[in-house]
Amino acid sequence: MIRLLLSGVVLGGFVLLWALLGSPRAPGGGVLWTPRSLMIGAAFAVIGVFGYWLPWALDAMLVADLVLVALIWLDATLAPRVGAAAAPKSVSVTRDPLPAVSVGHAGEVAYRWSNESARTARLLVREIRPDILGGPQPSRSLRLKAKAAMRDTVPVLPVKRGRASSGSFFVDSTGPLGLGRRRLRFELPWDVVVYPPLVSMRLRASVAEALRRRDAGLKAVRQLGEGRLFESLREWVPGDDLRHIDWKATARRAKVITRQYEAERRQQVLLVLDTGRLMTADVAAGVARLDFAVQAALELAYAAAQHDDNVGIMTFADGVQHFVAPERGRAGVRRVLDVLAEVQPKLVEPDYPGAFRYLAVRNRKRALTVLFTDVIDRFASDALLANVATLRPRHLPLAVTLRNPELDAAAAQRPPTARDAFRKAAAEELLHAREEALGHMRRAGVLVIDVTPERAAQAVVAKYLDLKRRGTL
């Protein structure tokens, strides 16, 4: 009985020792067993079973366990060290820069492993990636010969947009006997930006470009009218604007000459994203309102660039977070894309007066100002309604709001129970208050698009193309 208690104390001590030394944060890394050492330990335990009949068997088991523990420790000590930076007699790893990636689009990342030790490195690698790249990854085995290098390529599937710089590895390095493992943890930071989905955006942009070329073939490229670009001089006729008379040309030609202008083809498009508390709510399939707004803004930016318009962006919550002045072409779209990749909603009340004052100072040239936001009712959204109308007449404001499909469904259902009837009445009241607020904006001269989240991108691009076609900008 005493021998059994003694063996239990010894085994308990082994477990406690391993709990303390098995941590990867322990000096020199954690020490762990391998399946081979577990099998050997199980064989020794079978010997101990006969201790009831053979007094020496239990002593033999304890001695064998002590020898096994010593071998495990020695084997783990001889295992190659692994780290992010090269060191003598160690295994090092570096990561190739990851190209631009977008949500839902699979890519690949390459790791370069180098073994400077004199032994073959047998590694079990588990990577902890940033949340935007999927977080913890499954373990994978690597075998790296002595004094050799290898390139390891693994897939990457971004799950949400954003910027990240964290990242680490847990690596188990097995010793030459295959009995012990050294577990090490080291940092290998990422420097990655995940952009919103780009496939549908490029498809819509190509369609917009085809429509633009078709329209250009149906009408003259130059549209004379009340534009700001000087086109030519001609003789004045009754009905022409007296402000356009060129008095110097009139004096030289001894007849009244007027300037003729053509309509500007390159306008300003400014995307304004409200990232306050109303944009944090999930509206469809667990996706926040802001994510749908980001996708719609990105598709509009590409469509505007296809029509040779300048594109800029501003985001705000309780203060202005980003402002990019409208720029032409790829440079403007790229800067908008960088902002949209990082913007996140905040549970704060948006500062509409401060945001629109900032906008009035930073962007004085007339622009189609597309505001992605949401409204509840006229009173809760009073600050928004009071300030968005101040954009006129200098700018052309367009408010894009996202409907809640669940709320629409609750208002449209035929309630089978009293509880459902109350839900229907509440939903109808909320929708009526929302429509009242949107009607107030329309009466103030603000264009409004109120659509379901899935149709937001398509609707805002279609509205932009319609405004371009009618020359409203």
Image (cartoon, helix red, strand yellow):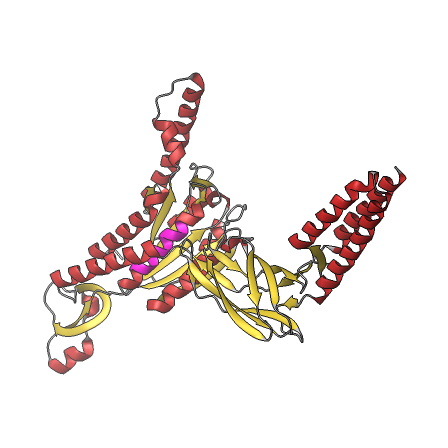
Along the viewing direction, whichever of 141 and 473 lies nearer the viewer: 141
Q: Nearer the viewer, residue 298 or 184?
A: 184
Question: In the image, residue 294 lies at what x, y percent?
Answer: 41, 52
Q: Where residue 411 appears, x then y in whole percent? A: 37, 28
Q: Is residue 345 above or below residue 308?
A: above
- Tell me if 270 is positioned left or right of 346 in this view: left
> Is residue 461 placed above or below 209 in the rendered structure?
above
Whether residue 301 appears in magenta in the rendering, the answer is yes
Say which residue appears at 89% left-offset and 39% top-offset.
2
Name the residue nearer the viewer: 149 or 284: 149
Please, which residue is most extreme toward the front here? 54
Q: Does 439 sit left or right of 166 as displayed?
A: left
Compared with residue 470, is residue 263 higher up or lower down, i.e. above or below?
A: below
Q: Main secondary structure of the magenta part?
A: helix
Which quadrant of the structure image shows residue 302? bottom left
- Stretch in magenta: 293-303
- Which residue is the extreme one toward the bottom? 252
The quarter of the picture where the N terminus appears is top right
Q: Nearer the viewer, residue 464 or 294?
A: 294
In the rendered view, does 263 fall on the left or right side of 315?
left
Kindly tell me whether residue 188 is visible in this rendering: yes
Q: Which quadrant would the C terminus be assigned to in this image? A: bottom left
* Residue 111 place in picture, x, y as percent: 52, 67
Can you give x and y, in whole percent of width and height, for residue 83 in the image? Answer: 64, 67
Rendering quarter of residue 204:
bottom left
Q: Is 296 included in the stretch rendered in magenta?
A: yes
